[in-house]
């Protein structure tokens, strides 16, 4: 009882401290005044709601969110960063391989060669203006990260170490393997996340940690005015008014049964945009990483193969030479994943059930593994019981990344239709955004680059449009009322279906009907199954009615977000009658540039999944670069 009382007192004290800090009349950074912050309260739907006003709000504190937040505060903008987990627990922390950039530290290199590889890797569905922007900036952002204090691995002469990674070449595919992936051992994401968190704290970014963002706040004329969130610690509801709202909430890998994603990867920001009537782009393109540990699904970085690791089948054959004669094990991820799947299908898998493949690192010097891949050695030991210096690791393709997301232009401004009409006040970056630099398939180590380049760009775009200490955004009196009513309805739901059961049904169905190799019958059946799952959401019931740390409620809200995104993925995949990048269709094995070189735009016709239907439209691919520094890359046969 005494401990319970102490806990309640501590909780109240922390809340008072937080509110007193938020009510502080002004803050100065390095001697410069950055304006007032205030918190007011109002009553909506029987809940007390705290209102906050900022120049900019970032939703999500992974790589993209933290780089955006650090950039915003360095521009002098009053900035809040809302995150449902502590920033350094964001899923960027799990990124291993590295970050691409044509620094030319190991061999000659050129950002145009990087851009060519990215266009080719994307199977010509990537927008070449955004690809040019990302690859041209890559060397600058790597040097910038180093100046922030990121502890890159080093070459003997002290330069940033760069390793080989899949799909990377020199001289527009004609010059052999590129060494372009800058790495901090095999914990590069971890290093980036901690470095960027430090940069955001260096100035005055106010973090709202363990706040669950529920919905965007939109004006009647389609402008984004901010968002509404719940503090998970005490259940309080908060509205954040902002001139610029940046969505950086990551992907929705947890829609699948086997994935490398953290349990927090539930597509929250993307589902918020969908509920606001905005489209998603290219959700059918889901990357399966070739080397997830069998059967746990934990990631073994592509850096394993970049350092010389080899995939072998049950006959001991290094089979990738048959599928990608030049690049072999360092072909693009979708190529390697399909090759592994075919080997297993044709009876050359390993293990008692011949249902996985071996990744051999045991021919590499133990000191190389200890220096370059220390985390992998540990992960393989824990999850597979394997000593990689002496025996192979069991691996299987595992869902890893969503190429699709909220459609944006190269400046990260969200667009809402086929004509690329900009949504004022709303930006998106990272895995939740779709600029589209990854097109139909992402190259390894382009994801961390995407986060840093477009997180920085979101801050720069906001700084062009919003002046420091702008007058507060005036939120409509009842803004967020529908969101609060929805949350209250779910908190008090008494349906017969537990959240976990419906979530498992969704994950098993996605794994079964939208796998590495897809076919028309499975996708058609998958659509019907997903529609039933959408309808079943109204039957979900939860047991916890409280507001303090109600994980039952949060997981149920997250489940709606997963269903929201998964349904759009299944419909988009069933409609795309071709094979392109990660979308391998057995009934349509060839790429069809005449009919399908276009982005899918998917919508829900109603905000909530139990009542909604999926609508598909299409948008042209931007096949021209930003300027004459880069030539247009014409479509060609994609071979490695």
Image (cartoon, grey):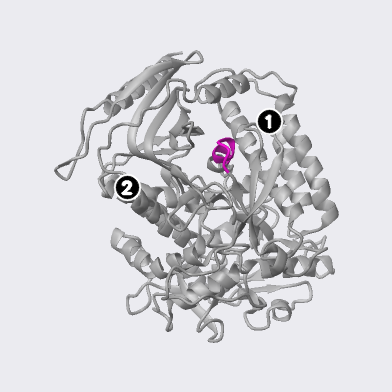
Cβ–Cβ under 8 Å for marks 2 and 1: no
Vertical arrangement, residue 137 with respect to residue 3, above or below: below
Residue at 73% x, 65% y: name it: 579
Q: x and y percent of residue 298 in the render?
A: 61, 54
Label number found at residue 467? none
Residue 35 occupies quadrant: top left
Residue at 62% x, 70% y: name it: 332
- Classify 10 Å Cα crowding around label 2: few (below 14), some (14-19), many (20 and above): many
Residue extending furthest toward the left: 31
Q: Which residue is mark 2?
A: 72
Q: x and y percent of residue 301 in the render?
A: 56, 63
Task: Locate residue 366 relative to residue 562 in the image: left or right.
Answer: left
Vertical arrangement, residue 114 with respect to residue 246, above or below: below
Label number found at residue 499? 1
Q: x and y percent of residue 485 in the render?
A: 56, 20
Residue extending furthest toward the bottom: 175
Magenta span: 271-278
Secondary element at tag 2: helix
Please tell me whether residue 335 belongs to the stretch shown in magenta.
Answer: no
């Amino acid at each position: 009882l005494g401990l319970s009382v102490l806990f309640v007192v501590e909780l109240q004290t922390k809340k008072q401290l937080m509110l007193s800090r938020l009510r502080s009349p002004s803050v100065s950074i390095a001697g410069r005044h950055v304006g007032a912050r205030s918190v007011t309260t109002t009553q909506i739907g029987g809940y007390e709601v705290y209102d906050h006003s900022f120049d900019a709000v970032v939703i999500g504190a992974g790589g993209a969110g933290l780089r955006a937040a650090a950039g915003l505060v360095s521009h002098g903008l009053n900035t809040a960063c809302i995150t449902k987990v502590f920033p350094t627990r964001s899923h960027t922390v799990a990124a291993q391989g590295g970050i691409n950039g044509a620094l030319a530290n190991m061999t000659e290199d050129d950002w145009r060669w990087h851009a060519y590889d990215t266009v080719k890797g994307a199977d010509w569905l990537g927008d070449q203006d955004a690809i040019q922007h990302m690859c041209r900036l890559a060397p600058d952002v790597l040097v910038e990260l180093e100046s922030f204090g990121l502890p890159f691995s080093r070459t003997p002469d002290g330069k940033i170490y760069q390793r080989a990674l899949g799909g990377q070449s020199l001289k527009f595919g004609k010059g052999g393997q590129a060494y372009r992936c800058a790495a901090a051992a095999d914990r590069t994401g971890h290093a980036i996340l901690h470095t960027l968190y430090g940069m955001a704290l260096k100035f005055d970014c106010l973090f709202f940690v363990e706040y669950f963002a529920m919905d965007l706040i939109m004006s009647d004329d389609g402008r984004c005015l901010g968002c509404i969130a719940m503090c998970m610690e005490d259940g309080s509801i908060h509205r954040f008014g902002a001139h610029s709202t940046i969505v950086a909430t990551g992907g929705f890998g947890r829609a699948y049964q086997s994935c490398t994603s953290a349990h927090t990867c539930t597509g929250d920001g993307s589902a918020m945009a969908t509920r606001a009537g905005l489209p998603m782009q290219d959700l059918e393109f889901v990357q399966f990483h070739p080397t997830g540990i069998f059967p746990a699904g934990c990631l073994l970085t592509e850096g394993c193969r970049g350092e010389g690791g080899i995939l072998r089948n049950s006959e001991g054959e290094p089979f990738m030479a048959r599928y990608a004669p030049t690049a072999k094990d360092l072909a693009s991820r979708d190529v390697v994943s399909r090759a592994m799947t075919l080997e297993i299908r044709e009876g050359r898998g390993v293990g008692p059930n011949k249902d996985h493949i071996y990744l051999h690192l045991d021919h590499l010097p133990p000191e190389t593994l200890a220096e370059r891949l220390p985390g992998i050695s540990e992960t393989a030991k824990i999850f597979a019981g394997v000593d990689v210096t002496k025996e192979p690791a069991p691996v299987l393709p595992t869902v890893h990344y969503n190429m699709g997301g909220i459609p944006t232009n190269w400046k990260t401004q969200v667009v809402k239709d086929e004509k690329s009409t900009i949504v004022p006040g709303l930006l998106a970056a990272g895995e939740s955004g779709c600029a589209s630099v990854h097109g139909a398939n992402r190259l390894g180590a382009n994801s961390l680059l995407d986060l840093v380049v477009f997180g920085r760009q979101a801050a720069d775009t906001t700084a062009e449009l919003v002046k420091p200490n702008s007058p507060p955004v005036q939120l409509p009196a009842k803004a967020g009322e529908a969101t609060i009513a929805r949350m209250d309805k779910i908190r008090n739901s008494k349906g017969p279906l537990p959240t976990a059961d419906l979530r498992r049904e969704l994950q098993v169905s996605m794994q079964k009907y939208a796998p590495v190799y897809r076919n028309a019958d499975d996708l058609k059946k998958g659509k019907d199954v997903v529609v039933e799952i959408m309808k079943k959401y109204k039957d979900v019931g939860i047991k916890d009615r409280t507001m303090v740390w109600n994980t039952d409620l949060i997981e149920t809200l997250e489940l709606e977000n997963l269903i929201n995104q998964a349904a759009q993925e299944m419909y988009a995949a069933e409609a795309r009658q071709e094979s392109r990048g990660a979308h391998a269709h057995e009934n349509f094995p060839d790429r069809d540039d005449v009919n399908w070189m276009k982005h899918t735009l998917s919508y829900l016709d109603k905000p909530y999944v139990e009542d909604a239907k999926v609508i598909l439209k299409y948008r042209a691919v931007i096949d021209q670069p930003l300027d004459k520094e880069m030539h247009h890359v014409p479509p060609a046969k994609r071979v490695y």
